Image: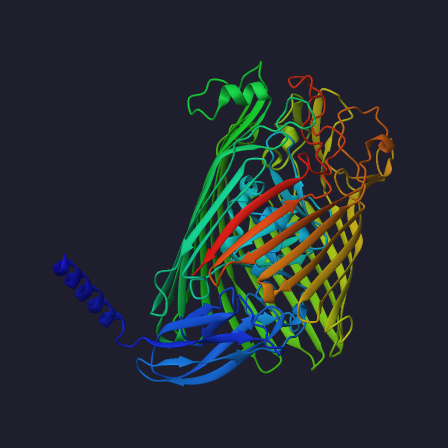
Amino acid sequence: MKIKTINLSLFLLQWTAIFAQSDATLFGHVVDETGTHIPFVNLVIKDSRIGTATDITGHYMMNNIPPGTHTLMIQHVGHKTKEMEFTISKRESKEFDITLETVTVALEQVVISGSLKEQSLRDSPVKIEVLGAAFLRKTPSNNLMQSIGMINGVQQVTACGVCGTNEIRINGLEGSNTAVLIDGMPIMGALASVYGLNGIPNALIERVEVIKGASSTLYGSEAIGGIINIITSSAETAPRFFFNTNWSNLGDRNADIGFSPFRGRKFDALFSGSIHTMERFTDLNKDNFADKVIISPSVSLFNKWSFQRPAGKTASFAVKFYHENRAGGTQEFLGAYNFKPDSKVRGSDSLYGETIFTNRYELTGSYSLPGSAGLRLDISQSGHWHDSWYGTTFYKGEQHISFANLIWLTNAGERHSITSGFTARYQVYDDNTPVTASGRDKQFIPGIFVQDDIRINTKTNLLAGARLDHHNRHGLVFSPRLSAKYELSGNTIFRINSGTGFRTVNIFTEDHAALSGFREVVISENLKPEQSWNVSISLNQTINRLVGRWVVLDADLFYTRFSNKILADYDTDTEKIIYRNLPDGDYAVSRGVAVSANGRINGFFTWSAGFTWQDVFAVSNTGSEKTGKEAQPLSPEFTGNWLLSWDARKIRTTVDLTGTFTGKMLLPTVDPEVVNDDRLSKPYSLINLLVNYNLNQSVRVYVGINNILDWRQNRNPVINWQSPFSDDFDAANVYGPLYGRTVMMGIRLLM
């Protein structure tokens, strides 16, 4: 036994010696001006791959630091970014404590979505809204789809009351108009738009950047409603090891795990995985349909590598795999189906159910080219397989997207910061519908873009950009963009943005009504691409030393106008759904006003509130029957959200109270005789609570309550649920929660 112990000790000493040859260590804590420790602060040594983050108690440690003098960059939302120099010797352990200055949240964050390079929100001519990792942890949710509604004017909408698929709407525009990016790359195609975000757990997200309105120059003309850019975590600042698991009273079970074993050398790596199941049948409205979709299971695997190359050049790549098996329907169907791979009940004409198998992979990479020209190559590849039954309707789809973006970042004098490049996008789509009856749909879209951020003077910036794409069916598409920022004072910023959009539509991947239900789908003509132009005006005002430390106010006006808008016609023929473009001279509009505010009180309380009024409608000026202005379904007139957060660090507890408000909206109908007043939903409010308690510097337990008021929509989400195989059956009548109050408990481990 002694020999084994000696051998083990020698083995450990040998490996310790190998890794201790140059492993100088820097450690300490990060506090604010009041001496309060700050958790989850990012610390990175400049011009290196060495970094870390403070733990729950505000302490940090960095190993494997080469001897010499270095510059440490410290970043945290709500505090001024700081750079500090330190000198360390070989094998030295050095204590290095840091104090950060509290500033406004809205202006000091670093973003990349406006120009493909890092810049502060204050300097960006484009208005960008940011959800940081800390904010994502303030809602009792497991993934981004459940947290995104805390951005003013952004909604998470359930598109199907049976299968539970969802989408993200910006300023009332359908989710298909929102471009979803992963680390700046458009890898979410039409087939993945209602499924892909469910596979991104909050644990993998560093921040989410949202731009409302057309953003066509850098990201393509399809970004009509705006973009959501999900910046994933890097191994530099991610915890060495993290584990999170939670469960709810409705049967939800979720677990996330991740680790970064290599850090501080010439490369970093992050590995993570997530699993989610929901296997309990719930039917609170007694319609015999499951209120909450059954998932058994969804699995997500993620791996990200980054490399430090000579002359400060970098390279990185990431891979993600997502699998999901979901089902919804009647209790008899789900009992007979039971997620058996060889189940014969899929496609049954006697028991109604909907089942969806999803498999998806994503590959992304970024490489800084050698030399001093400032060239970078971004590439991505994704594949999505979809196998589903909607009652007796079988739908099988497959989509592959390859993307390459060669970017050149350069300065022309002191006033011009230019972003330009070439893009190439190749996508292949195939399904079992008439859309691809003659063969796979293949599109190759090359493009060129240029954008100039012009610093006119110390207060004024002008951002002018243009993009030219070539579509193999529609020829050349020109997409201009113009933004301006004027700093009226150090605390007042005015912005104006405008741009155009151009988007082709796939009916069967974007509208579940085409699949769920038994009406005949009719595409009346060769559908033209939707086109739009957008303008928005925003004012940002910072008020220091008001209501505690500071308050940031935002006010926005937005207007988007569509031509060739594609709408579904349920009224002309009660046995058909007819999809057609709006005639020439007709148009659709999304317009509105958004107001928001956020602030901090006495270092312990933070708060935010937002309110949006929106008017989404179509106008008919042509034809024998001029209908005039017609409101569009599922676009609420008013939406709002708020947050109150208490950081009671002395008792190691945080309390977050969040809420949303949704006004009345027009609901879909399959009965043309129903007047609009009878189709209006009732307004409602949801309140959520999350309480975290830190057992020690590594372990946190939490309890959350969603929908404290136990509100549920009073209309059945499934129209004509008694006859699911009839022409009048429709599952797209969801406008609010279906399953009332839920309680979740969990534990999070960070090391």
Residue 215 in sight: no
Q: Residue 495's x, y, as percent?
A: 74, 68
Farthest residue toward the front? 2
Residue 622 drawn above or below residue 283: below
Q: Where, by quadrant of the figure, is residue 736 drawn?
A: top right
Q: Residue 77's x, y, as percent?
A: 60, 68
Side of 571 relative to 124 (left or right): right
Quarter of the figure that contains the N terminus: bottom left
Side of 612 relative to 99 (left or right): right
Q: Residue 35's x, y, as percent?
A: 59, 77
Count of numbered labels shown in the rendering: 0
Residue drawn at point x = 70 percent, y = 59 percent: 644
Quarter of the figure that contains the C terminus: bottom left
Q: Where, by quadrant of the figure, is residue 568 drawn?
A: top right
Side of 112 relative to 680 (left or right): left
Residue drawn at point x = 43 percent, y = 80 percent: 95
Residue 511 in sight: yes
Q: How is the image coloured?
A: rainbow
Of residues 711 and 158, the one drawn nearer to the viewer in this rendering: 711
Of residues 5 and 59, the one drawn nearer to the viewer in this rendering: 5
Residue 131 drawn above or below residue 487: above
Q: Where, by quadrant of the figure, is residue 654 drawn?
A: bottom right
Of residues 268 and 5, the one drawn nearer to the viewer in this rendering: 5
Of residues 722 and 222, the one drawn nearer to the viewer in this rendering: 722
Q: Residue 403's x, y, as percent?
A: 47, 52
Residue 438 drawn above or below residue 5: above
Farthest residue toward the left? 3
Residue drawn at point x = 69 percent, y = 65 percent: 605
